[in-house]
Structure formats: structure tokens, C-alpha cells
Image (cartoon, helix red, strand yellow):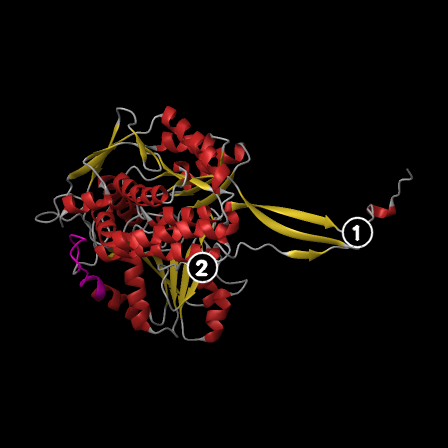
Amino acid sequence: MDLEKIFKDLGIKKTNPATALGSRWLSGSSSKIHSYSPVNGELIGETSFSSEEEFSEVVSSCEEAFTSWRMLPAPKRGEIVRQFGEELRAKKNSLGALVSFEMGKSLQEGLGEVQEMIDICDFAVGLSRQLCGITTHSERPKHRMYDQYHPLGIVGVISAFNFPVAVWAWNTALAWICGNVCIWKPSEKTPLCGIACQNIIASVLKKNHIHEGVSCLINGDRSVGEWLTKDPRVALVSATGSTNMGRSVGQEVAKRFGKTILELGGNNALIITPNADIKISVVGAVFGAVGTAGQRCTTTRRLIVHDSIYEEVKEKLIRAYKQIKIGNPLDESNHMGPLIDKDAVKMYLDAISNVKNEGGRVIVEGGVLNGNGYESGCYVKPVIVEAENNYKSVQSETFAPILYLLKYSDLNEAISMQNNVPQGLSSAIMTTNLREAERFLSHEGSDCGIANVNIGTSGAEIGGAFGGEKETGGGRESGSDAWKAYMRRQTNTINFSTELPLAQGIKFDF
């Protein structure tokens, strides 16, 4: 991979400023964020921390931009997003490779993530002509009521390292067509991806003479993110990350009666019934468990298998795991790349140790890979553990390729196991039985925000609203009517009569 060529294409330097207002960059503080690639452990670039003074300037610029941006007709805002999508198409290969190299996911997944950005732009463009309210018949004669939606103002986006570009696009594309302006704080583990994306949208804004405050970028750690959560001028904070992070964000924003979209932890289960197609079930389970090295919020973490087919599925899984190729994610022949950093490796090792102590039986052994090609120390083996659903380790989310294999005898039991965790993001059932499928999707079925039949827990599509329940946070992004979360609803009543009827027949004589 020609990193120098990619950097040039995306406008990235070895040392980058911290804060962006459109195409205008501010230098930041003396503190640095160093980006080390988990692919080879090498330093690939750095950026400064945003200062609090710069953040204040960003917010002021956003406030100013909002006054003009909100009055641009929604289809015109959609045209800006359309052009952004076209620029992403032109930069897809470079940006996808950067995602892969800085985060460690496979090149196919990196390119796929950029494609998600393109897809949400297409979705948002169409949506920009469909921001519809509802007209309601009034109980009063010659009166009309209707709902309409107005932009909120400033939207803050806090994203995670595992999807360093797509989650920002999911939020901003919708927020922009709704008439909002955005401030993005990317993960401090993937700062270069944030700079690349800002450069792309900034070029579009500049070409169209759009105010620089429509899209802004800040960089830093948790303390920088807290500026977004605490500032009353930021109307909505969309935060993706751990449940603990979400609790902190949710509480802080709630204190000032702001709005939040929270996309937090997942502990996703795949149920395989005796009526399942075993072949596609194993494919879905393996991809769901080891894709992105288990660092997706939709990763398959629990596999709940009927006791009549348990041994058959286990045998096929073991055989499949022996075929998994681990190595440089830019090599398309490899199935799994590295974890994000050595802290993640420690969490992986601790999780294995903990589940063993609880009585878990490891049937596919893990470990850290060493030697040629594994110099970063971030490459690990995927693990399968026979366990019980009530284990503390099974109840919590570990961002690593650890799959817990669980056994059930009755579908009621399987659904209960699926639901009996604090998280509620994604779920799936493998079955060719209509009754089993419909039951899983019914009121007494999965309690997750996403419930699939004959497809794994991963692979969310742009057209559907993405998000989950319980400790996953309850937020929804991307498709369906998720756009409403970026707007405020207003009820309007119009009296076109010559009288003003009052409630309960009250009359005034003047």
C-alpha cells in the first residue's frame, strides 16, 4: 500500500492541525494524538488536541451557519449531500484503504464502510424531498391541524474507532438534509480518518459557497467530547461507543434537557434451530463472530444451538475456524485482521481467563500471534468457548473474536436466553420453519432493535433504522424514519373561520 499516495489524495499530512471549520483549520494545543496502525505497529501520523478556545470558535461558527443553512430549501441541502456522495465515490479506494490501515479491518470491509457512506448520502438525497408531517382533522369547525418538523440546530457526533467514517456519515447526512449543522469528534484511535472525511466535505462546501460552520471537526480524548455534552448550544449529541460512555453522555446531556442518540454495546445472539439450513447458519455465525476481529457492535457473541444438532454444528464450526486466515487486512486473502491496540488484546486475554474461571470449556484455543507479519502485537486467534448464558463473562460485551457456544432444548428457552442479557442490539434465528420465524419476530420474541431471520447479526442496511434497546441506548440512526430524531416536532392549528370557538363552550361578551 502506497500510504504517501493515499495521504496526498485525502489531504492528510504526517502532522495535522486539530480543529476544522469547513476548510479552515486551527492549530490546536501542544498535546498530540499519535495514530499507530495495528497492522504493523508503526506511527502513521499525528494530530493536535483541539483547545477549548477553538471549540468555542467552532460553536460560534456553527450558530452563524445555522441561520442561513436552515433556510436553504431541503432539496437544495440534499444537492450538497449528493455532491458529497460523488466525492466519496471518487475517493473510495483511498479512504477505504486508510480505514483498513488505521483501524485494522479488512480492505473489503474498509471499502464497504465507505460504500455505506455513499449509500446514506443517496438515501438522504431522496429523503430531502420527503420531510413530511401529518395533517389532522380538528374537532373545531373550519380549523386545520398539522405536524411539521424543524431543525434542532447544532448536532454533535461522537464516533467510535470500529466504524471510523460510516457512523459519522450516517448522522451528518441526515442531520444536514434536516437543516442542522454538525460538529464531529472522531475516536482518538482513528484521527486520520476524521481529517480525511472533513477534507472531503469541506471541498464540497467551499465549491458551493456554503458557510464553513455547516461541518466542523474537533479532536481529542474524553475531555474534548465532554465539551459537546455539556454545552447547551449543542441541541443533540449522537454518541457511539461503550455502555459506560453512553451512561456518562446521556446523564450529562439530560442535565441540560438536551437530546441524545445513543448507540452503545451489543451482546448479540444467533439461534440455530433443528429446522435451520446448517450450511448458511455456520457461514453467518463465523462471519458474524470473526469479522472486524469481533470489534463490531453487531458481532455475534453468543451462538444458541438446539441440542439435537449441537454436536454437528460444533464440529462444523471447529472445522471452519481452522480455515480462518489471520494477517494483514490489506491482503484480501485474509479473513481477519488485528485488534485495534494492545489494550484491546489485554481485554481479550482477560475475557478468556475469566470465562475459564467460571467453568467455560475452550474448544478453539486463542492466543496472541507472534513472528513475521504480526509485529504490532495486535493479532489474535478467534476463540470458541462452551459456556452458560448466566456467566458474568457471557453477560458482558468483549470487543474481540470470542464466541460463546450455548445449548438449548426448547424455543422458549432459546428466546429467553437470547433476551436475558443487559444489551439489546441485534439478534437472529436460523430456521426454515415459518412458525419459529414469526414467533421470534413477535411480541414474545426477540427484545432487540434488530431481529433477523436466516441472516446473521451483522450486516445492517442503510434502509433500516439502526439501533437497539436496553443498555444499547435506544437510539436509531440511518434508515426508516430515523431522521425525525434530528428535528423538533411542532403542532400547528389554523383557524380559517370568522369565529373563535373556546373550550367547553366558554363565551366572552365584549
Residue 479, percent from left and from top: 45, 57
Q: Quadrant of residue 14?
A: top left
Q: Which residues are magenta?
A: 320-332
Q: Residues within 10 Å of mark 1 (few under 14, many from 20)?
A: few
Q: Is residue 340 above or below residue 251?
A: below
- Mark 1 vs mark 2, CA separation in Å: 43 Å
Looking at the image, residue 121 sits to the left or right of residue 17; the answer is right
Residue 184, percent from left and from top: 38, 39
Q: Nearer the viewer, residue 418 or 39?
A: 39
Residue 308, percent from left and from top: 36, 72
SS label for mark 2 = loop
Looking at the image, residue 436 sits to the left or right of residue 508; the answer is left
Question: What residue appears at the point 38 percent right and 59 percent down from the top-left corner?
Answer: 460
SS label for mark 1 = loop
Dot label at residue 497: 1
Give the quadrant of the C terminus.
top right
Residue 361 in view here = no
Residue 121 in view here = yes
Q: Nearer the viewer, residue 92 or 204?
A: 204
Question: What residue appears at the point 25 percent right and 55 percent down from the top-left corner?
Answer: 383
Q: Is residue 416 magenta?
A: no
Q: Is residue 326 magenta?
A: yes
Dot label at residue 464: 2
